[in-house]
Amino acid sequence: MDKTDTPIIPDEVIMNKILIIRGVRVMIDSDLAELYGVPTKRLNEQVKRNIKRFPEDFMFRLTKDEKEEVVAFCDHLQKLKYSPVLPYAFTEHGAVMLASVLNSERAIQMNILVIRVFNKMRKILEDHLEILKRIEKIEENDNEQDKKILLIFEYLKQLEQEKQRRTYQEGRRRIGFKK
């Protein structure tokens, strides 16, 4: 298969298929099978034949509750709703290993796209984290400035009260002995 035969898939389509389950970014077996151009059943057969290549940090099977949650929140996974089989979730490394197990030209090329999207997401998250740190620093500075401004207003209030007290004292009619 030539590069021209590989369908062009926008990064957003792949990004929408990347989920966070158990605190890890993963892709569900049916989504990867669709991208790699193979039936999900064949993909899972290849995984079972090469199970030593897929430790738990590369791939894990969803629990029933996780499957229900994924189906509830991801419209494109509605087909899993009535499936009796619990799907596999593949991490970035699992997706790379999967492409090597499938060993088709399309799987290899789609895997390159998937890895690029994972990397792009990682970069976005790193940039986002840097922005959050900067905002936090600005907020800290802002809080310090707020405290200083409040202190200045407190001093101004005290000065104004002292001025009013003096004005009141000066405007009073004096009583007592005059010198």
Image (cartoon, helix red, strand yellow):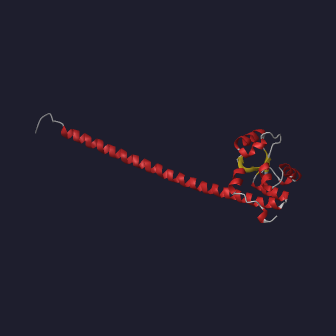
Residue for point 34% across, 46% down: 155
Residue for point 18% across, 39% down: 171
Residue 49 at x, y percent in the picture: 89, 52
Residue 79 at x, y percent in the picture: 78, 43
Residue 58 at x, y percent in the picture: 78, 52
Residue for point 12% across, 35% down: 177
The furthest residue to the left: 179
Image quadrant for the C terminus? top left
| Res 80 visible | yes
Residue 144 at x, y percent in the picture: 46, 50
Marks counted in the figure total 0
| Res 24 visible | no
The furthest residue to the right: 49
Camera-side residue: 126 or 121? Answer: 121
Would you identify the image quadrant in which residue 103 lies?
bottom right
Image quadrant for the N terminus? bottom right
Camera-side residue: 8 or 144? Answer: 8
Residue for point 60% across, 54% down: 128
Camera-side residue: 119 or 9? Answer: 9
Residue 84 drawn above or below residue 137: above
Residue 84 drawn above or below residue 116: above
The furthest residue to the top: 176
Residue 30 drawn above or below residue 69: below
The answer to whether residue 166 is left or right of residue 93 is left
